[in-house]
Amino acid sequence: MTPPADHPAIPQPRVGVLLINLGTPDAPEPRAVKRYLGEFLSDRRVVELPAIAWQPILRGIILNTRPKKSAHAYSQVWTEKGSPLAAVTRAQAEGLKDAFGPEVLVDWGMRYGNPAIGERLRAMKAAGCERILLAPLYPQYCAATTATANDKAFAALAGMRWQPAIRTLPPYHDHPAYIDALAQTVREDLAKLSFTPDAIVASFHGMPQRTLELGDPYHCHCQKTGRLLSDALGTELVVAFQSRFGRAKWLGPATDDTLAALAQAGKRRVAIVAPGFSADCVETLEELAIRGRETFEEAGGTDFAYLPCLNAEPVGLRMLRSILAAELAGWLPAA
């Protein structure tokens, strides 16, 4: 039926996929990092302390001391395309642009910083996306990553009169396509090395021990990924956790302590992989590849290699296409 001449324009109905990652400052300089950390560390999913106790510490101490140090870390890994995390996430979205047919729009957004999740959801709705799959690219579920990304999307939806239908991507820590992709890239990267590692470390982002005790499945998901990847590679991986912050007890063992202990125990050749990250970022390129190497060599290690994330490599894009297609079932036109 032809709508009346004065009817508002309605775009052709489409399906949307919004890839979501953590976020990044807009520039590797203290002012931009301060804005980013202010948003990140004010998230109650990230710091589970009463605001009345936490905000004075954040505003009075942390945001006046940490941005300069963090800006230096970002400056060591910043690229011509900007933040590695943003550049890779953009490349993943571009690599999946035609993966599901012309009726499917693939976009990307960040939980903190730009492009904001709400901004991209509104743009997708304006482009005709009446059904949207939210895809937080965190293989292992954590309230401080997956849940807060979904929270931000739901908050944006609360402001829409005409909301799209929504699905969310489940954690894929044990998905066969994910484990196979990891194993393939690790094997290929190990084959390129000039040495045979005495140990391979699987480093996951750390979380406070309290999150496990409160019921967060993150630690269990990380351990399962490590076990399945070990089985696929036919060699035991050493699972560790990085990025400790503050005085609380964190999930362990700590990656830096583990690297030092391996060198001191005579395992002088080590490779490290980060299966909890879908894209390389400051936590992998600076914390592991640079500072991890320094820690290992200072403890007596001789050979160290950081193995990149899946990123937007063909094997990583095939993996994403596979798991996203399963979640889009029933929304896509019949082949």
Image (cartoon, rainbow, N blue to C red):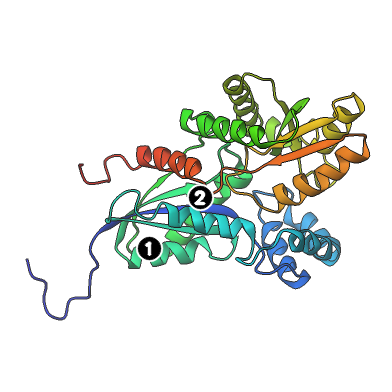
Q: Nearer the viewer, residue 170 or 159?
A: 170
Q: Secondary structure at mark 1?
A: helix
Q: Picture quarter containing residue 114?
A: bottom right
Residue located beneath label 2 in the image: 150
Can you say which quadrant of the picture contains the N terminus? bottom left
Query: Which residue sits furthest front?
Result: 194
Q: Amino acid at mark 1?
A: Met
Q: Earlier in the sequence, mark 1 or mark 2?
A: 1
In the displayed structure, does residue 321 sit left or right of residue 13?
Answer: right
Image position of 228 with respect to 99: above or below:
above
Image position of 260 with respect to 57: above or below:
above
Q: Nearer the viewer, residue 124 or 257?
A: 257
Image position of 242 with respect to 166: above or below:
above
* Residue 9 location (% of width, % of height): 22, 74
Residue at left 48%, top 30%? 175
* Residue 62 location (% of width, % of height): 83, 60
* Residue 268 location (% of width, % of height): 85, 29
Residue located beneath label 1 in the image: 124
Question: Badge 2: how crowded within 10 Å, few (<14), some, or many (20+)?
Answer: many
Q: Secondary structure at mark 2?
A: helix
In the displayed structure, does residue 5 sit left or right of residue 234?
Answer: left
